[in-house]
Amino acid sequence: MGSMSAVVVAVLCAFAMHAGFLVTNAQLSPTFYNETCPTLNDIVFNVVSNASLTDPRIGASLLRLHFHDCFVQGCDGSVLLNNTDTIQSEQDAIPNLNSLRGLDVVNNIKTAVEDSCPETVSCADILAIAAEVGSVLGGGPSWDVLLGRRDSLNASQALANTSLPAPFFTIDQLNASFAAQGLNLTDLVTLSGAHTFGRARCSTFINRLYSFNNTGNPDPTLNTTYLATLQAICPQNATVDNITNLDLTTPDQFDNNYYSNLQQLNGLLQSDQELFSTTGADTVPLVNSFSADQSAFFANFVVSMIKMGNIGVLTGTDGEIRTQCNFVNANSSATLLLAGVASKVNLVAQSK
């Protein structure tokens, strides 16, 4: 079978594993900016590519940023918003605090895009394209990113604290978290594969190293050799939150080694290893399949990323096109502030 035929088969199988069809937002299109900003994809690629020369983690960071955006009130760029008088930033939510990276790169992309195509391209779309570029630069798959999202006028720190799956989640908790976003078990296993590159802080997995579930012993599903390595990086009662590679084999490459690591009990996060080590879990055959066939993983990753990129999008006249990704536009900010004042006045009047 030729390589092209193999790719076609993998893609068809991926669609079958995602219930045979891909639900997309009809208002999103890969050609959305063809007339209004024809150089958009080149601009994003160049900025991210230049950033990767000094920061090999940036691709993984941008993928994570897109994920953390979409899982909180949809793919609307809300994760990019800073604190203001009317906005509590999602960046300060527990899952994001001091761990989100790539915000500066998104801002650099936005600046370059505004120079070329002012007031045209949303920050949510920039983030979606940047995530795809991050995959490609790591050696992963490419896809036609559906575009036409608009940016939110608000953020939800509260939702960020409850909607994002935690690194200590069990398989049932992971399934529930993804199902809440309209994603299925195949999406869960596939999107978790993004942990094939990037880094993680000790605080996200130290629960496995010394007294797992308050047993006084390490997580039994953690390879003992790997355990010793991680304990050296993350000493008990350490005051510094060190980092280590999510993938101990090819840390900066987007490949299917993540799944073979799980088979060897070398998954870093509990939420990763749960996919393989939970007895009887339907995720285990998928891990085995993706470990054996990188093309199948890549094909499914494309489908799942497009599905995720459709969560809760704003289109048409909803939201806005921000001119700065960290802040809503001045006129929108004034409207929100006035609405807040009016609400407080109304509450005072009702209390009298």
Image: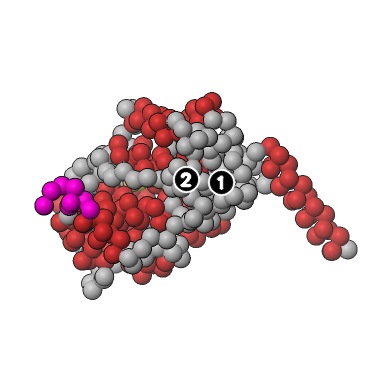
- Marks 2 and 1: in contact by CB < 8 Å? no
Taking depth in this image into account, of 248 and 105 the one nearest to the observer is 105
Q: CA distance from mark 1 to mark 2?
A: 9 Å
Residue at image coords 36%, 27%: 50
The picture places residue 96, in percent across and down from the top left corner, at 46, 48
Q: Is residue 289 left or right of residue 76?
A: left
Q: Please say if 7 is above or below 270.
A: above
Asked which secondary structure carries label 1, the reply is: loop
Identify the amino acid type marked 2.
Answer: Leu
Q: Is residue 33 left or right of residue 86?
A: left
Outermost residue toward the front in this view: 35
Residue at image coords 65%, 38%: 329
Q: Is residue 237 visible?
A: no
Q: Is residue 228 left or right of residue 16?
A: left
Residue designated by label 2: 147
Identify the amino acid type marked 1.
Answer: Arg
Q: Is residue 298 visible?
A: yes
Taking depth in this image into account, of 244 and 123 the one nearest to the observer is 123
Taking depth in this image into account, of 243 and 173 the one nearest to the observer is 173
Dot 2, crowdedness within 10 Å: few (<14), some or many (≥20)?
many
Residue range in magenta is 1-8
Asked which secondary structure carries label 2, the reply is: loop
Q: Is residue 232 left or right of residue 2?
A: right
